[in-house]
Amino acid sequence: MLQTEKYDGVAADNTLEFVGNNIFKRKLRVKLKRLRIDNLAENMTTDTRRRVKLYALNAERQWDDRGTGHVSSNYVDRLKGISLLVRAESDGSLLLESKIQPDTAYQKQQDTLIVWSEGDNFDLALSFQEKAGCDEIWEKICQVQGKDPSVEITQDIVEESEDERFEDMSDTAPPIELPPCELARLEEISETIQNCLTTPLRKEKLSMALESENYIKKLLNIFHVCEDLDSTEGLHHLFEIFKNIFLLNKNALFEIMFAEDTIFDVVGCLEYDPSSTQPKKHRQYLKQWAKFREAVPIKNQDLLAKIHQTFRVQYIQDIILPTPSVFVEDNMLNTLSSFIFFNKVEIVTLIQEDERFLVDMFTILTDPSTSDAKRRDIVLFLKEFCNYAQNLQPQGKDSFYKTLTCLGILQALEITLVMNDQKTKSASIDILTAIVEFSPLVVRNYTLQQVNRTEGDRMLLNIAIEQMLSDSEPELGVAVQLMGIIKILLEPESMLTEKADFLNFFYKYSIQTLISPLLINTIGDRPDSEDYQTAQLLGIVLDILSFCVEHHTYHIKNFIIQKDLLKRILVLMKSTHTFLVLGALRLLRKIIALKDEFYNRHIVKGNLFAPVVDAFIRNNGRYNLLESAILELFEFVKLEDIKTLCVYFVENFSKIFDEIEYVQTFKYLKNRYDQYQDRIKDRDKMSLDTGIPIIRSRFRRDPRQMDDEEEMWFNEEEDFADEYDTYNSVMKSVTEKNGPSQSPSQQQTSMQQKSPPQGAQHGGGLLGSSGSGMNSLSSTTTSSTTLTPTAGVSGSGMGSVSSISGVSLSDVVSNASNSSSSLDHTQSAAAAAAAAA
C-alpha cells in the first residue's frame, strides 16, 4: 500500500516541486487519483475469470489472434496498480498483463468487446465469450477511472477537462512561432514541426503558421540553395520537414505544395531520404520518362493542368510517401486521398462538358482510316476515363455511361475488340466490363437492336464470344474476363422486360458460336484435340453452359435435348485432363439436380450414364476427386429417389457395382429397385385376382414453377403414362427382341471389392451442385470389412474392362443402346396398352 500524504493549501509534499500554480494543481489531482486507486485495491483483488480471446493490431492494421484464456483484474505489485491479466486456457501462461491507466481511453463495443491502446500504434482488444464477463471487467475499469459504467468510452477526467479547455481556447490560444527560415536553422525548424504533431490543436496552429507566413515557398528556396551547395545534412532535414507537413493532413497546404510552380520542388525534397544511400530520381521520371499522350488535342487548359496535377499527386502518394501502416493514425493521409478523388471527379466533369472533344474523339475512333496506334491511344484514354468515373455517385455514373452510349462507345468496341494489338484489346475489354457491371441493360438493349443486321455484320455479343474462344494467352486472362461479362449478361435476375427477348436472341444467334469448339472437338467417341489450351477453353465453355442450366429453364433444356448436346459433352469424360472430365461431370450433375423428367428421359434414351460408369472403371479405384464426384452423383439420385434414373441405373449397370461396399449407395439403389418391382407385381396380382382394372394416374411433373412460355414451348411434347410402367414395358419388349441377358455364371467375376485408403472417407458435394436433400457422402455407412485388390489389376487410366469385371462394359452399353433405340417405337404401344387396361 502506498503511503499517503496530506496537502494543506498550496504546500507541496517532498516529492513535488512547485513550478507554478497550474502545474501544482495538475500533479495534485494525479496524486489524489493514485490514492483513490490505492483504496480500491482492497476491494478488487478477487480473481474474476472470464473466457476471452486476446487480439493485437499488427503493422498492416489487421487484428492478430494472440490466444484464448481467462481474464481477471487484480492488483499487481510490480505495476503498482490494478491490472488486467489474461492467462492462457491451454497451459496457464500469462498472455497479457496490462495496468489500467487512469488516462487511457477504453472503449466498449458490441457488448462483448473492450478495445484500448497501449503506447503509440499498439492497440489491444478483449473479445468476451459472455456479455456478463464483459460487463464485469468494464465495471472494474470504470471504477478505477472514476467513470459511470453506462458510458461506452472512458477518458481521464483531467485530460478531458484540458481538452475541453483547449477547444474553448482554440481561437484565443497564441499562435506557434516558427524559427526564421534560414539554412542554419533547418534542424530547429524540423524539431519544431515534429513537436507540433502531438495534439490536434498544435497541428492546427502549425498549419495556420505555415500558410500565413508563406513558409513553404521559403523552405523551397532554401532547398535550391542546399542543392547548389550540395548540403546533404540540409537536404535530409528538408525531407523530414516536408514529410511531417504531409502528416498535418491539411488541404490548404496541399494546394500550395501541388501548385504548378512548386510541386517538382516538393518532389525534389522527398528525394533525399536519410535512410537511403543515394537520392531517388523522382523528378527525372516525372519530367523525362513519363510521357503524356494526347489522343485528341485538349484545348481546355484547366483540364490539361488538372490531369497533370492528378498524375503527379498520385505518384507522390503511391511511390514516394511511405505506406500508411507506418503512421500513428489510420486516417493520417485521408485528406490526400480526398484531394486525388475530387480531382478525378472534376476531370470527368470537365470532359463531359466539352461535347466537341468527345464527338471528335469517337469520330476518329470509328473512322476506318485511323491508324492502329491512334486507336490504341484513344482506347487507353477511354479506359482511364472510365476508371476515373468509378468515383462518381450513382446518378453521375448513370449520366456518364448514357453519354458514352449515345456517342457510340459500343459500336467503337466492336472495332477495337477484334484488333490484334493486345493493349488495345485488353483496354477494350476493361471498358466493356465497366459498362456491363454498372448497367447490363444498356448492352442487352444494344444487342437486341442488332437483330436486323445484314449477314456480314457481326454482333457485339458474338464478337465477345469469339474473342473469348480465340484467346491465345497461356493463362487465358482475356477469356476468363469475357466469360464474366457473358455471365452477367445472361443473369436472369438482373433482367427486366428484356428477359424473354434477350434469351431468345442468345439461343437463336449466339449459342451456336459458343459451343462450336465443343462440337468440333467431340465428333468421335474421344476428344479430337487434347492440348492444354483447347482443354482450358472447353472448360470455360462448360462453365458457361453449367451457368445456363442452373439459371435458365426451357431455353437451354430445349437446346440440349434437340441438339443432343449432353452426349457430345460427355465425350469429354474420356479426356486426359481431369479438370475437363470434372467439368463435364459437373454439368451432368447440375442437370440431374433439377429433377426434371424431360432431362431424365433424355439421359435414359441416350444411355448417358455409360460415359460416367466408364470413367469410374478407368479410375481403377483410386481415391481422388473424380471418384468422389461420381459417387456423389449417384448418392444424389439415391437421396432424391429419382425413380427413372434409379431403374435405368440398376438394370444397366448394377452388376458392375454389386461388390462395392465401402459406400452403401449402390446397395440402396438396388433395394429401391426391388421395392419398385414388388409394387408392380402386387398391383398386377391384385388386378388379376379382382378383375378390376388399375386406373393409372397421369404423369405429374416436379412441382417446379413453369411460366406460360415454357408451357407453350413444350405443348407439342408427347404425354407419358406412369414413368416406371412405361419403362418396364419397353425393357420387356427389348428383352424379348434381343434375347435373354447373360447368365449369372458370366457375371460372377464382377468388379473386385475395393476399399478407400485407411482413415479416408468419401466426401460428397465436391462439384458444387445444389439441390434439395443433397447430403455429403460422409454420411453414408462405410464398410468395415478389410478388402484386398485382386492380383493382376494394375495400372492407371483406360484399362480393359474384362480385367476388372466379368461383365464387359461394351456389352452393357450395347444392350442399353438397343434398349434406348427401341424406346421411341415401343413407347406408343406401351401407352396404348395402358389405356386399354
Image (cartoon, helix red, strand yellow):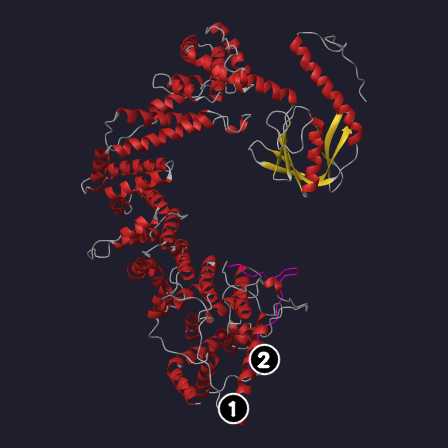
Q: Measuring from the top left, give residue 527's x and y in whole percent.
A: 40, 63
Would residue 456 be seen by someone viewing this image from the given angle?
A: yes
Q: Look at the image and tell me in which quarter the C terminus lies.
A: bottom left
To which quarter of the image does residue 548 belong?
A: bottom left
To which quarter of the image does residue 2 belong?
A: top right
Q: Measuring from the top left, give residue 440's x and y in whole percent.
A: 34, 49
Comparing 23 with 498, the one in front is: 23
Q: CA distance from mark 2 to mark 1?
A: 37 Å
The amino acid sitting under disc 1 is Ser
* Main secondary structure found in the magenta portion: loop
Left or right, residue 41 beside residue 262: right
Give the secondary structure at mark 1.
Answer: helix
Please state the extent of the stretch shown in magenta in the rendering. 745-767
User: Which one is in front in this view, the residue at disc 2 or the one at disc 1?
Assistant: 1
Q: Measuring from the top left, give residue 715's x and y in whole percent.
A: 34, 73
Comparing 270 with 575, the one in front is: 270
The residue that label 1 is drawn on is 687
* Above or below, 8 relative to 626: above
Q: Measuring from the top left, give residue 142's x and y in whole percent.
A: 69, 30
Label 1 environment density (alpha carbons within 10 Å; few <14, some 14–19, many ≥20) = some
* Above or below, 452 relative to 789: above
The residue that label 2 is drawn on is 748
The amino acid sitting under disc 2 is Gln
Left or right, residue 344 beside residue 72: left
